[in-house]
Amino acid sequence: MTAKTKARAKAKTKPRAKAKIKARTKAGTKAQPGKFRETPAAASPKPVEQPLMKALRAEHRHMATVMQLFADQLKAIEAGELVDTHVVYEIMHYMVTWPDRFHHPREDLIYARVAELSGAFADDVDTLQRDHDNTAKSGRALLRDIERWRIGELTGLVVVNNGRAYIEHIHEHMNVEEKLVFPRIEEVLTLQDWRELAEDDQLKAVSSAVFGPLVQREFRNMTRKLRRSVRRAVERGTMLEWLGIESFMESIEVVSIAVESARDTTGDSLRDAWRDSLQYFRDAPLSAPLRCVANNTRITFRLLGEVAEISRETLDDLSRVNQERKDRVRWLTRNTARR
């Protein structure tokens, strides 16, 4: 009897858990003894991550990337844009061919070892394994929907709705595993358990590349889209960074011009005041002080008005620079989305 069969047999000897693991993640729900629960914050130093768990987490990250690509394709279908229907097909074909056939069964083997060590986890393990089975069934059903959509037997809206439900479930399932199940597994299994699991032929494949040459050849269109999305993200990030730098430099230039204008205007006003004062003292020394005060006041108010005008013009120019940056960012975002 295999480890997985033993785990299922133990699960059937007791009442099936009514509450799903998902329910235990809700706020305010108390963790029951012997059930998967979050590791306390004040725990001992985190042990070194085992290669098998590290690989499972890496596969989760990769599946999340594939699901993001799928979500982008569904958004394009909903918007009535042209999409490569074969890429949409390859995404789901990949999910039912690789994660459902290799990733989830490997998780089940590890879960089964946990159930062997502690029968209290049998119900939870059985719930996870049944969820893997249901996910595989829904994935195959969605793949059939995509096939019918490609030949015109089904509307794109059906694929969009069912596809989004599938994506939501995948993310929900992975979140439960990452936050609740994986930490509990690492708490229960010993180094000896990990060594024995690593010797299992069915688990050896976990050490291979998540998206190796064989997968790349079979799903080459999806691989190309994934690489393109990564490259596009890098290109967009670089462009956005450059637009920000360019806008900042233009803003500095605007302020610099404003400072120069204010300095020149102030210099002209001081020269005018000095020249007028000398002329007043030459013409009428006795009345010159009063005339200088009146003239300097007039020049000061004129200077303040000119500086205020320079400030308004500077703010307008800075606003235009910022608006131009926003327009270019929107243009970049719109054209990036169309590629």
Image (cartoon, rainbow, N blue to C red):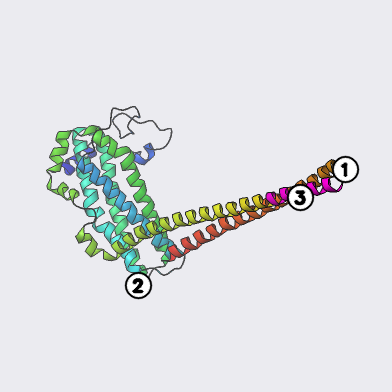
Rendered view: 9 above or below 150? above
Who's the residue at 87% across and 46% down the image?
A: 284
Range of magenta residues = 266-284
Element type at marker 1?
A: loop
Question: Camera-side residue: 32 or 317?
Answer: 317
Say what amino acid the circle numbered 3 marks: Arg
Real-space Cα distance between discs 2 and 3? Answer: 89 Å
- Badge 3 or badge 1: first in the primary sequence: 3
> For mark 3, does the 10 Å Cα neighbourhood hold few (<14), some (14 to 19), or many (20 or more) residues?
few
| Residue at which label 1 appears | 287
Question: Camera-side residue: 73 or 140?
Answer: 73
Who's the residue at 85% across and 41% down the image?
A: 290
Whether label 1 touches label 2, CB < 8 Å: no
Q: Is residue 282 left or right of residue 310?
A: right
Q: Quadrant of residue 239?
A: bottom left
Q: Which mark is residue 275?
A: 3
| Residue at which label 2 appears | 151
Q: Quadrant of the N terminus?
A: top left
Say what amino acid the circle numbered 2 marks: Ile
Say what amino acid the circle numbered 1 marks: Ser
| Residue 149 in magenta stretch | no
